[in-house]
């Protein structure tokens, strides 16, 4: 989940969201470059707990353009790759009566808030229903924030270096809603983060695959976006195949992004969350049309490693 907390993507970019994957990715990159150039403090130091630093961000063009094929709903049994030759090393099917606290913590590793976002993360926003984890965002004031929502992180219970991480989920639509499934290195000074999927609810026909690398002093970003059928309709799988020297993103079994530069080698923890944006957040603020309560549903989260 990108913690760059940029202001809203400019309206012209939003209007161009259906141009196709290559054109959209270029527009996203231009918008990010312009915004970061205008805001030298455009990254938050949420990972370190210190104030945002005056640093530059280099936006790197995507290694491969994302295909424009439409997505179809993923059945519960589908995997993005043939799992022969892999071991299942982490798995939560969310079939219990409550969150498995041997696997997850209901807060970010660095706290329950992010500066430019409007939600306070609370365990009460998490529920298990019909074999799925439901993260619910509500218009409800708590600890100075106007909304509540939920997050799960595998820190400190599980981290891994290299493997195939996959989520089957249904994301909500609505202005200001920001669904994410991501990996992050829990090491002070590191900027390493792999956003397996980010969907901004104001445009659920567009998804993002993002890699942050480098240090908190020298930050680098690789961004890919793809257009698809409405991701808020039905269930979809989002996955990352992380190998030494390469990362490949999949959506419903279709490759959407591939990079070979800046690939992390340090172990990473898993995070899934539903944020509610504000005026200075990348997702933008809510409006009168945003539905509350809003649910981000997760059928499973799995991690495989090659034998």
Image (cartoon, grey):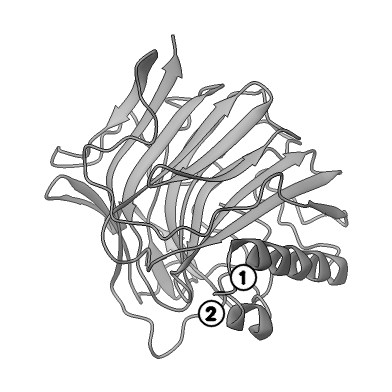
Residue 281: which numbered mark, if any?
1
Dividing the picture into quarters, in which one does residue 184 lie?
top right
Viewer-side residue, 80 vs 57: 80
In this picture, is 264 found above or below 213?
above
Identify the secondary structure beneath mark 1: loop
Picture coordinates of residue 270, whole percent (x, y): 47, 36
Dividing the picture into quarters, in which one does residue 91 lie?
top left
Is residue 286 toward the left or the right of residue 29 in the image?
left
**Residue lying at 86% horizontally and 43% vertically, measured from the top left:** 218
Picture coordinates of residue 215, whole percent (x, y): 80, 38
**Residue lying at 77% horizontally and 52% vertically, measured from the top left:** 61
Evaluate if marks 1 and 2 touch, with contact meaning CB atoms under 8 Å apart: yes
Q: Is residue 5 visible?
A: no
Picture coordinates of residue 266, whole percent (x, y): 65, 23
In this picture, is 28 found above or below 265?
below
* Label 1 neighbour load within 10 Å: few <14, some 14-19, many 20+: many
Is residue 304 toward the left or the right of residue 220 in the image?
left
**Residue lying at 37% horizontally and 63% vertically, measured from the top left:** 231
Residue picked out by circle 2: 285
**Residue lying at 73% horizontally and 39% vertically, measured from the top left:** 213
Picture coordinates of residue 17, whole percent (x, y): 57, 74
Number of numbered discs present?
2
Viewer-side residue, 231 vs 126: 231
Identify the secondary structure beneath mark 2: loop
Residue 116: which numbered mark, if any?
none
* Label 2 neighbour load within 10 Å: few <14, some 14-19, many 20+: many
Viewer-side residue, 187 vs 38: 38
């Amino acid at each position: 989940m990108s913690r760059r907390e940029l202001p809203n993507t400019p309206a012209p970019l939003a209007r161009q969201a259906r141009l196709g994957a290559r054109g959209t990715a270029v527009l996203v990159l231009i918008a990010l470059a312009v915004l970061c150039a205008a805001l030298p403090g455009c990254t938050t130091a949420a990972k370190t707990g210190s104030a945002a630093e005056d640093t530059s961000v280099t936006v790197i063009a995507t290694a491969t353009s994302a295909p424009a094929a439409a997505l179809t709903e993923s059945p519960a049994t589908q995997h993005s790759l043939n799992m022969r030759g892999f071991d299942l090393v982490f798995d939560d099917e969310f079939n219990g009566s409550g969150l498995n606290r041997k696997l997850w913590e209901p807060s970010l590793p660095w706290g329950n808030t992010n500066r430019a976002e409007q939600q306070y993360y609370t365990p009460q926003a998490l529920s298990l229903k019909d074999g799925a984890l439901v993260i619910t965002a509500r218009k409800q004031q708590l600890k100075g924030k106007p909304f509540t929502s939920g997050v799960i992180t595998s820190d400190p219970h599980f981290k891994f270096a290299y493997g195939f991480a996959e989520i089957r989920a249904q994301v909500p639509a609505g202005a200001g809603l920001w669904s994410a499934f991501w990996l992050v290195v829990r090491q002070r000074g590191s900027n390493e983060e792999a956003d397996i999927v980010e969907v901004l609810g104001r445009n659920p026909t567009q998804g993002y695959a993002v890699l942050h690398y480098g240090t908190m002093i020298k930050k680098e970003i690789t961004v890919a976006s793809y257009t698809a059928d409405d991701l808020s309709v039905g269930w979809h799988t989002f996955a990352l195949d992380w190998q030494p020297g390469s990362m490949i993103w999949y959506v419903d079994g279709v490759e959407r992004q591939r990079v070979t530069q800046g690939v992390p080698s340090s172990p990473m923890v898993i995070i899934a969350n539903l944020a509610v944006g504000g005026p200075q957040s990348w997702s933008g603020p809510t409006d009168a049309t945003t539905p509350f309560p809003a649910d981000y549903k997760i059928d499973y989260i799995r991690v495989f490693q090659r034998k």
